[in-house]
Image (spheres, helix red, strand yellow):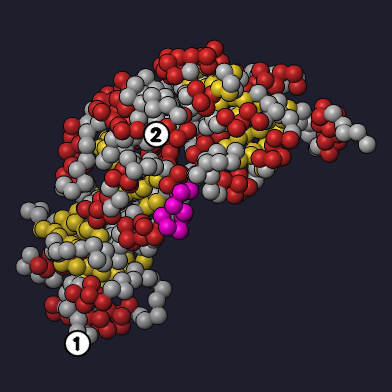
Amino acid sequence: MPLLPRRHKRRQWSRWNTVEEDAQVLGVARTLTSATRLMDVMRLLRPEDGISVSFTVNPGSVFADGLEDYFTGLGASVLSWREARRRSFDLAVACAVHPSMRRLDAPLVVMPHGAGYNRLVTESTGDAAAPAGLSRRELTRWGRVLPAAIGVSHEDQIARLARTCPQAVPVARLIGDYCWDRIEQSVPRRDLYRSKLGVGHGRRLVVINSTWSAHSLLGRCPDLPLKLVTALPADEFAVALVLHPNVWARHSRDRVHLRLAAAMDAGLLVLPPEEGWRAAVIASDWVVGDHGSTTFYSAALHRVLLLAATGLDELDPASPTAALSRAAPRLDPDGDLLEQLLTAAEKHTPEDFQDPVDRQLAARGEAGRRHQEVMYPFLGHRNVTLPRHHPGPDPVPEPSPERHLGPTTFDVTGTVLPDDSVAVRRWPVVAHHHEEARGFYAVSDQETHEIWRATAAVLARTVIDAELGPEDWLRHHIQHPNSGLDVAVTALADDRCLLLLRRGDLLLEAHAPRPFGSPRPQLDPLLLGAAVTVWLNAARTAEELSRGLLIRTGTRATRVAFTAQP
């Protein structure tokens, strides 16, 4: 039997459709980075317009690990590369171009997968002066331009394209940056994203961002996440890490998590490679980064910025990202990290990097419509017309950071202020990464390291529904022959604790009153024990606590009332 023509096959397949999908579009990904950007773009092809979307993995990239699982996990229709080459499509869309895409039977539209075209990757381009995505090798075959359209986020990229591949200029189209539009649209959800990251109660968020390669932040300063999370007072700062998806794909999730294990024990939040980085940047106060797109978008959001690596050795010198790398202040990984953050915040002005941002991000707020105006005309022969209404950018999803239990031992310092309040600072302690104590140690009942437990001045039980009763647990630990504890604390509720002081064998119940018009306060038993120890170390009496205590951690103040055992 002779093979049916392709158009006849398409008519046959429609027999099984519940709704008509005459237009067939293929999304083509080479890496997870391009895949996540592709999912942004494909949401602009509306199913109600009769458009069917499938995805395929263009093979050959060293960063392709896990791509099919990514698409399958989203419930997308996935075709093998072989099957994608055998079928015809009305349009193929890719956010990373490769000459092998010429084998597809479809007009090809290519777009950037980051903030513009910036990186020099001679392995892909064969040209030390052409950034990836704008090179002659990637865009042409035997002198013929392969893509039917090349999307750029700013007109400046067309001028650069004229230098690297002039024959491709006629198909270049200004489409803006839909990823940026989604970020900007999501700014009102900052408090929601901070809540999901656990950044409340006066804490500020530092996001560390590393792209891939030896020139990246992680390539230059692999221990910076651990250094930073242990250098900042835990009650005043939270630290989150965003790694380029290529890092995860090249080194495997298991090895990345093992490398970050100590930092995560100290409280580091790790954003998964698929999503969450945008919400983290919106939630951030500082960004410590390099030449990756996440850093660039952070500058566009006017975040306080410090670079631990510039990447100038692998950037197109004419790119706005290179200009940003040249202009942004540097972080000294071996210096006083807290002081550097505070100094950068004092000197920061929102307009510091406006020029490179403006040269990278054009047509702001218009990217959705411009993307559609490039893609929909290829579907016109299927009676698919451009939607009448402008597609507003969707807010980005809430972050779901990966985290460990968090710090179980703190190095504590503090002082009693003239108003009789207690200012406390706690730094996470990690085994084999702690040299000299700043003050005294406070440990939770989750700590397993014998040295920290044996040398602690404060022990706190964080589990409310525990085996031993609260008073029995306190007396067991305070009265143990080898105990050097000054204070033992156990949680009774989110806002109540029971304390036993070695001095005077005094048992106190503490609670945090809720001020009018304020949320219900949280009373951390380990912080409470630390504050009481600071009070006692300042030669204040336990009996004076009956008047209450005001605990200060940075800008946050928590008032605690005490009731002595009858």
Q: Is residue 356 left or right of residue 549?
A: right
Q: Which residue is mark 2?
A: 293
Q: Position of residue 185 (x, y in %)?
A: 46, 30
Report the magenta stretch's main SS.
helix
Q: Quadrant of residue 148?
A: top right
Q: Residue at x 48, y 18 (%)?
A: 165
From the image, state whether disc 2 or disc 1 is nearer to you.
2
Q: Is residue 98 above or below residue 67?
A: above
Q: Residue at x 40, y 45 (%)?
A: 243
Q: Which tag, 2 or 1, sits closer to the chain's start?
A: 2
User: Whole-Å distance between the Cαs marked 2 and 1?
Assistant: 57 Å
Residue sitting farthest toward the front: 142
Do we see residue 176 in this rendering? Answer: no
Q: Is residue 251 magenta?
A: yes
Q: Position of residue 468 (x, y in %)?
A: 36, 81
For the residue pair 25 and 349, the one nearer the viewer reads as 25
Q: Is residue 348 above or below residue 530?
A: above
Task: Report the magenta residues as a range.
Answer: 248-256
Q: Which residue is mark 1?
A: 481
Residue type at mark 2: give it: Ser
Residue sitting farthest toward the bottom: 481
Q: Is residue 85 above or below residue 228?
A: above
